[in-house]
Amino acid sequence: MTEETDAQLLQRMAAGEQSALRLFYDRFHSAVYQFSLRTVNNSADAADVLNAVMLEAWQRAGTFAGQSQVRTWLFSITRNKSVDLLRRKRPSELLDESTQETADGDFCEYSAALELQQQGAQVRQCMDKLKDSHRQVVYLTFFEELAYPDIAEVMGIPLGTVKTRMLHAKQQLLQCLRRLLSKDE
Amino acid sequence: MNQEINDEALLALLPWYLSGRLDAAERAQVEALLKRSEPARAELETLQGLATAVRAEELERNQHNPVPTELGWARLQRSLAQSAPAAKPARDWWRPSLAAAAALILALQVGILSRPASVESDWQLQSGGAVQQLTGGYRVQLRFVDHAQWKQVRAFLLDVDGLLVDGPSTLGVMQVYVPANSRFADGQAMLSYLQQQPVVQHAALLGQGR
């Protein structure tokens, strides 16, 4: 038996079939929850976002136009819900996407690639220091392995901004790791 | 100069070359760059290390943040039921229940519920009244971290299907009933899980029901 495609599941959801929603939920709930967690940073809020995203997917299944992948569409809803939640909770901070696209400039030649793999705590610390919008790009690129046009769609930003954020995030990560690793020596 | 600009643009694509998410034309251009440029190969190697480290770290983080699969589904079903249009005009029969639930939540928050009669081996819900006997699970003593918010406590209790059976005491200690189910192999596994939760400051197994 062939597995239903994501789009077929959405079609059945649009027809009101809750069994399709259950399959859809099983397929995507983990990715939605974990991606949201990278933005909202606590499990209770991520659970709220998961619920809101799945509810919206159910209600808007019939409007999915098929111009992007279902996963991209879903991540886009997730990101919007997560940002909305953060805006409600900490309105004074977020989320000026147009600013701070700056980096230190010097291209980092740090190449202790193998050593990096053994520095879990430092990697976490440095990831946490990234701006939300940069951390999301890194996560979607390296962990979810989304193509950069998909990331642009998820985040609602131009293609060039995705690349710029990735470049800056990479530089900041490497600089941060270099600092931490040199302290340990 | 155009070549340099082009090379810069291609270097920016390396993260997606690594994950195999470039289209054929872009991939061919990046491969040509890697063939002719030593710095590009070094950059790719650095990115490889970074990507591996980030993936490993994210995986570990995921393990510490288990996804609320069944609880999330149950909650979604409740949300769906609430969002569905009513089939007929609703009567106000639910209002007393809602008020009672709100009162209970408020009472739990401020810790004003009266203590139930002590029980030997089975436990009862803190709400008393028509007593619900709880058997076959674990009785756990819990204290939450000082900065825990009610929302977090509630999420925690929902996660473990926990029911408050006693407390909070003046020191903030509660007794919670956690049902035995296939999720936890035994009481120790359940306890370890509780102790790993960020919202939990202290957890101890008091007993197991019959």
Image (cartoon, rainbow, N blue to C red):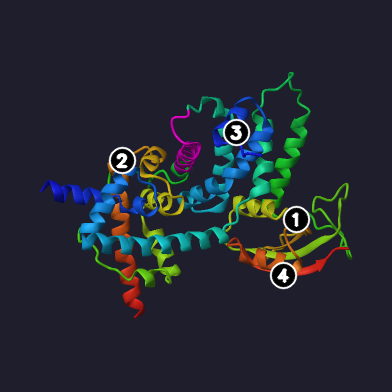
Residue at which label 3 appears: A9
What number is the disc on residue B164? 1
Q: Quadrant of residue B25?
A: top left
Tags 1 and 4 in contact by the CB under 8 Å rule? no
Residue at which label 4 appears: B204
For the residues tagged 4 and 2, is the chain the same? no
For the residues tagged 3 and 4, is the chain the same? no
Q: Quadrant of residue B103?
A: top right
Q: Nearer the viewer, mark 2 or mark 3?
A: 3
What number is the disc on residue B191? none
B63 in relation to A66, above or below: below
- By secondary structure, the bulk of the magenta-drawn segment is best described as helix
Tags 3 and 4 in contact by the CB under 8 Å rule? no
Q: CA distance from mark 3 to mark 4?
A: 44 Å
Q: Nearer the viewer, mark 1 or mark 3?
A: 3
Q: Chain of mark 2?
A: A
Tags 1 and 2 in contact by the CB under 8 Å rule? no
**Residue A12 % position (x, y):** 62, 29
Q: Amino acid at mark 1?
A: Leu
